[in-house]
Image (cartoon, helix red, strand yellow):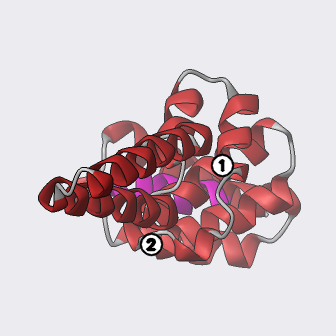
Amino acid sequence: MFSNRVRIFIAFVFLLSLGLLLRLHIYELAAVAVMMIVLLIWDYFKQGTLVVAAKHFHNKDFEKAEKSLKEISNPKWLSKKRRGFYEYIYGGICINKQEFEAAEQHYELAAKYPLRNLNDHVAALVTVANICIRRGNYEKAKAYLQLTEQHADKITAKMKDVIHKLHKETLKK
């Protein structure tokens, strides 16, 4: 939820308050300060700067979004829900930078984790299929499009239309 800079500042404030509280022998509040520091550290590893990156991504500021994502030292440590969203956002950034091979990898990983909703999951699958079609890998595209068929009754009409168009494109080749 915070950038790393803000997280460090808040931890520093709690550390100072911890020292003051221990000096004044107010141990109950000192324990709360310790818990807040531990919570900030846990949040760093399990949530990262994903909320900040998502805000920038939503506002189409891909440069700031990527910078925020790069603050996450090890994406493998993110919680399962956050890891999928991390890969989804990074895939979108790669597409914006026209790095389709990296985007394909990120969207493939995003599809393996739970995302915000079913449409995001299907969008990740469709994006991988679309990239595969553009790169001439029609068999892989067909496989990913088949994965979307499991959710055909629960997705939006717009997404169904995109899937239908991609199916037609794979049949042409």
* Residue depicted at x 62% and y 54%: 127
**Whole-percent x, y for residue 107 in the image:** 62, 62
Q: Which mark is residue 20?
A: none
**Whole-percent x, y for residue 116 in the image:** 34, 53
Magenta stretch encompasses residue 126: yes
* Residue depicted at x 17% and y 53%: 29
Q: Is residue 133 visible?
A: no
Q: Can residue 13 be seen in this view?
A: yes
Describe residue 45's horizontal placement relative to residue 40 as left or right. Answer: right
Q: Which amino acid does label 2 sit on?
A: Tyr
- Of the numbered discs 2 and 1, the one sitting upstream in the chain is 1
**Whole-percent x, y for residue 123 in the image:** 49, 52
* Residue depicted at x 44% and y 40%: 13
Describe residue 78's horizontal placement relative to residue 138 as left or right. Answer: left
Q: Which quadrant holds the N terminus?
A: top left
* Residue depicted at x 35% and y 45%: 17
Q: In which quarter of the image is residue 131?
A: bottom right
Front residue of 81 and 14:
14
Residue bounds of the magenta highlight: 114-129
Q: Mark 2 points at which residue?
A: 113
What is the distance, in whole Å, between disc 2 and disc 1 at their CAs?
A: 17 Å
**Whole-percent x, y for residue 33 in the image:** 29, 54
Q: Name the residue under label 1.
A: 69
Describe residue 171's horizontal placement relative to residue 155 as left or right. Answer: right
As displayed, is residue 41 above or below residue 8?
below
Front residue of 124 and 159:
124
